[in-house]
Image (cartoon, helix red, strand yellow):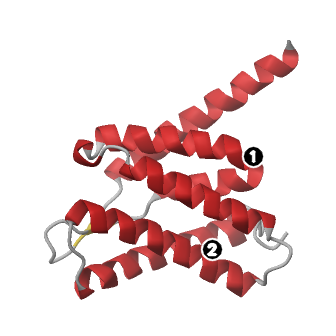
Amino acid sequence: MYLLSNNYKSFISSFLITLIFIIIQIYFPKIATSEQNLLITIDFLLIYILYLCFYYPIYLIIIFSFFVGLFQDMIIQSLTLGLISFLNVLFVYSVGFLKDSNKIWTIKFKYIFLFSIIFLHKFLYHFVFINQVNHFAVLFIFIETFMNLILIVLIDKIILNKLFIR
């Protein structure tokens, strides 16, 4: 009975932290660009899902990220229902590959791989949502990805005591 109760506590705490990150992401300042639909933001939920991948089994985080993405789709953009869910599942699957290869790769290659999957996540989202990608959009996606990666590195080095190096 204790183990069952402990699983519920873990699930409820993850759910509450997710709600907190959703609220933070909604009210966190965004950088408006000259393009019509482009806002440069820090994706706190994506970073949170990234770190959940290193603490829990990947199949649980795939399911969790699917429902978080579905919630984001319903709240933020109902026109592209399922897009963020699909992209989150692809992101978690790729991070699971990074988790499995954690001891083989160098730290620079891990950051390059992480940068590329975040860039692909953002690029596919903007490609489907905006329906056009020009060189300004790619530049803004690059800046947004770089900002997210800097935050990941800072959290990894300062708060979590080098999770990627293990």
The percent coordinates of residue 47 (x first, y second) are 55, 59
The percent coordinates of residue 71 (x first, y second) are 40, 37
Foreground tag (2 vs 1): 1
The percent coordinates of residue 132 (x first, y second) are 20, 73
In the image, what residue occupies the spot 45% across and 47% down?
85
Circle 1 SS class: loop
Q: Is residue 136 above or below residue 8?
A: below
Q: Give the residue number, with chain letter if any, for mark 2.
A: 153
> Is 106 situated left or right of 141 in this image?
right
Q: Residues within 10 Å of mark 2 (few under 14, many from 20)?
A: some
Q: CA distance from mark 2 to mark 1?
A: 20 Å
Q: Residues within 10 Å of mark 1 (few under 14, many from 20)?
A: few
Q: Give the residue number, with chain letter if any, for mark 1.
A: 56
The answer to whether residue 142 is visible is yes
> Is 81 situated left or right of 93 in this image?
left
Which label's residue is closer to the chain start, 2 or 1?
Answer: 1
Circle 2 SS class: helix
In the image, what residue occupies the spot 75% across and 63% down?
99
The answer to whether residue 150 is visible is no
Kind of residue at disc 1? Tyr
